[in-house]
Image (tube, grey):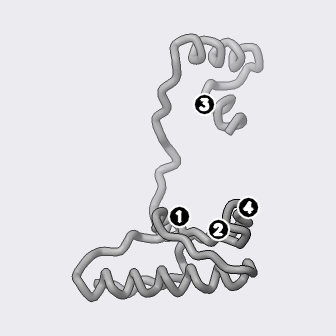
Amino acid sequence: MTKINADHYTYRVMWSEEDGEFVARCAEFASLSHLAAKPEAALRGMTALVRDIVDDMLATGEAPPVPFSQREYSGKFMLRVPPQTHRRLSIEAAEQNVSLNRLIAAKL
């Protein structure tokens, strides 16, 4: 199995009012978090935790998730909306003389 670099995962650090500390999270491992008094320490702790989890997964033959930064994306996704919303957006696109796709992409 290919070694995955834990630094390539997607991390976020933010203040947790509830905990009174900074909390670091990793998008690819949504159930994990690490608390620390300083944001840098929270990030270091989370990265170390993810590194340990990835190493354990590889040691037991499990496939760790591929980092978002290394995944391939088509640029397409399906979105279901109520018929009334579809109609309203179609009218708005026509009034702006753009495709529905272009209108929605601009809104995103």
Among the 4 quarters of the image, the one containing residue 38: bottom right
Residue in the image at 26% along x and 76% along y: 62
Work out how far the residue at label 2 is from the one at label 4, CA to CA, in angstroms: 16 Å
Residue 63, position in %: x, y? 30, 74
Which labelled disc corresponds to residue 101?
3
**What amino acid type is highlighted by mark number 3?**
Asn
Quadrant where the N terminus is found in the figure: bottom left
Q: Which amino acid does label 4 sit on?
A: Glu
Give the quarter of the figure containing the C terminus: top right
Per the model, the C-alpha gap separating discs 3 and 4 is 40 Å
Q: Which of the labelled discs sits on residue 12, or is there none? A: 2
Residue at mark 1 to residue at mark 4: CA–CA distance: 20 Å
- Which residue corresponds to mark 1? 27
Give me the residue at 45% from left, 61% from top: 72
Q: Which of marks 1 and 4 is nearer the N terminus?
A: 4
N-terminal-most mark, 2 or 1? 2
Q: Residue at x 54, y 78 (%)?
A: 8
Number of the label disc, if any, that sits on residue 17: 4
Of label 3 and label 2, which has the lower sequence position?
2
Q: Nearer the viewer, mark 3 or mark 2?
A: 2
